[in-house]
Image (spheres, rainbow, N blue to C red):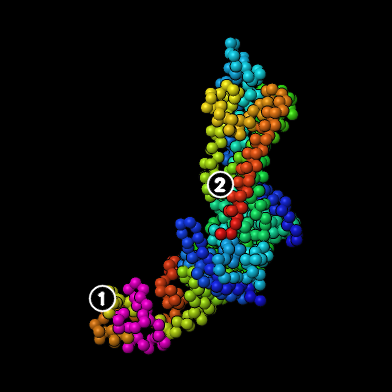
Amino acid sequence: MESNRSFLLQLQILTKRMVLRVVRRPLAELPNIFISAFFLFVYDGALGDVFGGSVSGTPFDFANGNFVNFILPVSILSASLSGAASGIYLVEDIESGVFKRYQSMPISKWAIILAPMNVGAVKVLLQASLILLIGNIIGADPVVGAIGYLVVLSLAFIGGMGIAGYSVAAGVKSGSSQGAQAATFLFFPALFLAPTFVPREALKGWLQTAAAFNPTTYLIESMRSVLVEGWVIDVLLKGYLVGGIFAAITLFLAVTSARKATEKA
Amino acid sequence: MLAVDVKNINKIFANKQDTVEAVKDVSFQVNQGEIFGLLGPNGAGKSTTILMLTTLLSITKGSASILGLDVATNDKLVREKIGVALQDTGIDNLLTGRELFFTTCRLWGYSKKDSEKRTAELLELVGLMEAADRRVKTYSGGMKRRLDLGLSLVHSPEVLFLDEPTSGLDPGSRRVLWDEIKRLRDNGVTIILTTQYLEEADELADRIAIIDEGLVVAEGTSDQLKAGIGGDVITFSFENNDDLENAKNILKSTVQEKNELRITVKDGASKIPGYLKDLSSNGVEVSSVSASKPTLDDVFLQVTGYRLEGSEDIKKEEEKSKR
């Protein structure tokens, strides 16, 4: 046996095992991709001509002539919800007793906890990339050029990690994979208590207030800035800052709750 | 050096609403290369004891060491030395047997090449080579238990903990697993197993500790425990409840089990006529009487006051499978 079982090697082995689990259940991945793509097609189909400015007489051309650019962040964030799978994977391992098996071995508890989060991160990137590709095919065209897609992807990743952290914390707290799944439904309302279909200033008063307190708002606005307006640095920075704080808080909660779960009773 | 040394361990689970003393006071010692059985019913404290010894639960009071290493202060080193197959340890159903062995070998520090070699050895050892590339969800209960046992052997542990290893298995699978456990012992592995099956303890364990309500109530080899009963067991059966109650007053020191009374005496067969005479002269009708050498079942009944449920079922299953 090798004398040095490094943390990174353990993490890599456990992540690979988790990837195998995901690959063996391909149908479990479809609903989130389908819904994200569905949002993109349906919102563009229903609202594209109104808010895109091509219907004569409409005063609302905040999409700068390309509604796919405007609505794409909503579908991207919907794809980021796939990060919630991290919590579900971890709790599945706790429920099935696999977690206990690893605890009885001399391996790092952090490797056990971080492996599902790694897989969640990869899933977010893959699903968001797929939606970006679909968006590109149906007409998305960032005003800052192709680099805009990378910015959108990085923001999606930060948001996805925030959701992953939340789902791990909720999953460990509830102690069941159904609990982890149910807790992530909270993010659906969050997706709509935001400037989802129109800019924030066009929302009614109460919704404008709710949107101001919703981290989703800042992620959507910063993604939109590079897709629709150009390099609007303050909006972009706000997106990274709020998304980063959100992810830091939920990852802290994830680590704290997971540490409690791995402590000896 | 002792393989396992347990000194007065105690476990209390406490939360805001409740406090439960799952293990009150358990002590035992296990020599290297022996199979030690912890026998007791569900809820007796066997699994909690195993969880403490395998470093998965903290010990509230007392101390325990594995191969001289204190489980509380040297938990990481202890985990290097032990193999664990718990009742509720999970197996990833979506992976194949080969993938599970390979992953576990890699986690134990084997190189890729050595992991492949060790995987093949272990698949052969637990008789799963043919099913190696099938997903575990297609395995039978017996195959899963063998896989579980194999996974606990990846790093060639010196001490192996098996928590109810044959629970829920059919007689055939149980026999296969028993043979594998004995082979491991013959190869020098120390094994601590919990069971609620008397036959399993009798068949496998070199020494047995009977554990009840968080306490060790008897300990020794199967023969020592049986000899400790102090003679033969005479069993009287009664059809009438009044006869049974009267007989209880006439025959002293009996243990009641449903419509039967048991009494343990030296040279039981020769004493039966005298007992029957006493009973008959007091108008007590006995439906049947027999004398037998004590079994582990009798030992359990004597030290706990009740019979271990489930043991009858395993006996019937064994007889059925022999037919």
A220 relative position to B231: left or right: right
* Contact check, label 2 and label 1, Cβ < 8 Å: no
Q: Residues within 10 Å of mark 2 (few under 14, many from 20)?
A: many
Q: Which mark is residue B135?
A: none
- Would you name the residue on which mark 1 appears? B242
A10 relative position to A201: left or right: right
Q: Position of residue A35 (x, y in %)?
A: 57, 32
Q: Is residue B192 above or below residue A102?
A: below
Amino acid type of disc 1?
Asp
Q: Residue at x 59, y 53 (%)?
A: A260
Q: Residue at x 53, y 78 (%)?
A: B220
B251 magenta-colored? yes
Magenta span of residues: B247-274
Amino acid type of disc 2?
Gly
Q: Residue at x 34, y 72 (%)?
A: B258
**Can the viewer see residue B150?**
no
- Would you name the residue on which mark 2 appears? A171
